[in-house]
Image: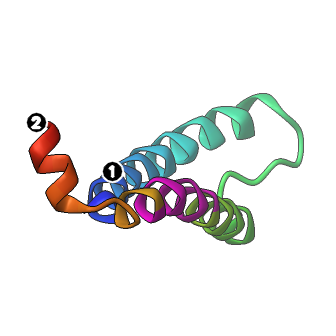
């Protein structure tokens, strides 16, 4: 459940980020000399790094939640 929630938020964030990066890349190309707004290596590398970081960040609470006893938590409520 934790992976699914963080996964959906990260997919939305990556999609919005790629769209904004393309738009800001065009702006940078118009302002700077010899800058290409389409560089697939940068887009892929940043997406992979972000995915790895999000997996690590989501793995910590998911592992902690899986170690708890559900009956103890239900009695606590």
Whole-angstrom CA distance, mark 1 to mark 2, is: 33 Å
Q: Which mark, residue 58?
A: none
- Quarter-wise, where is residue 46 in the image? bottom right
Quarter of the picture containing the C terminus is top left
Instruction: Please name the residue shown 60% across and 62% down the image.
Output: 56
Which of the two labelled residues, at mark 1 and mark 2, occupies the earlier sequence position? 1
Looking at the image, residue 23 sits to the left or right of residue 45; the answer is: left
Label 1 with label 2: CB-CB less than 8 Å: no
x and y percent of residue 22 in the render?
54, 48
Looking at the image, residue 61 sits to the left or right of residue 51; the answer is: left
x and y percent of residue 26 in the render?
61, 41
Instruction: Please name the residue shown 49% across and 45% down the image.
Output: 17
Magenta region, residue range = 53-63
Query: Which type of secondary structure does the marked residue at label 1 adopt?
Result: helix
Out of 67 and 11, give the one closest to the viewer.
Answer: 67
From the viewer's perspective, is the residue at label 1 or at label 2 nearer? 2
Q: Residue most toward the right?
A: 33
Instruction: Please name the residue shown 29% across and 57% down the image.
Output: 8
Quarter of the picture containing the N terminus is bottom left
x and y percent of residue 29 in the render?
73, 40
The structure's colour scheme is: rainbow
Looking at the image, residue 13 sits to the left or right of residue 4; the answer is: right
Number of residues whose C-alpha sits closer than 10 Å to that of mark 2, classed few (under 14), some (14–19) or many (20 or more): few
Residue bearing the label numbered 2? 77
Is residue 66 in the magenta section? Answer: no
Residue bearing the label numbered 1? 12
Query: Which type of secondary structure does the marked residue at label 2 adopt?
Result: loop
Q: Main secondary structure of the magenta part?
A: helix
Out of 59 and 69, give the one closest to the viewer.
Answer: 69
- Quarter-wise, where is residue 69 in the image? bottom left
Out of 62 and 7, give the one closest to the viewer.
Answer: 62
């Amino acid at each position: 459940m934790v992976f699914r929630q963080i996964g959906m938020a990260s997919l939305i964030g990556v999609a919005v980020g790629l769209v904004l990066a393309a738009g800001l890349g065009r702006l940078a190309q118009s302002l700077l000399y010899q800058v290409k707004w389409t560089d697939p290596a940068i887009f892929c590398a940043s997406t992979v790094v972000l995915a790895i970081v999000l997996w690590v960040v989501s793995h910590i609470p998911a592992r902690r939640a899986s170690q708890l006893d559900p009956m103890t938590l239900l009695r606590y409520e």
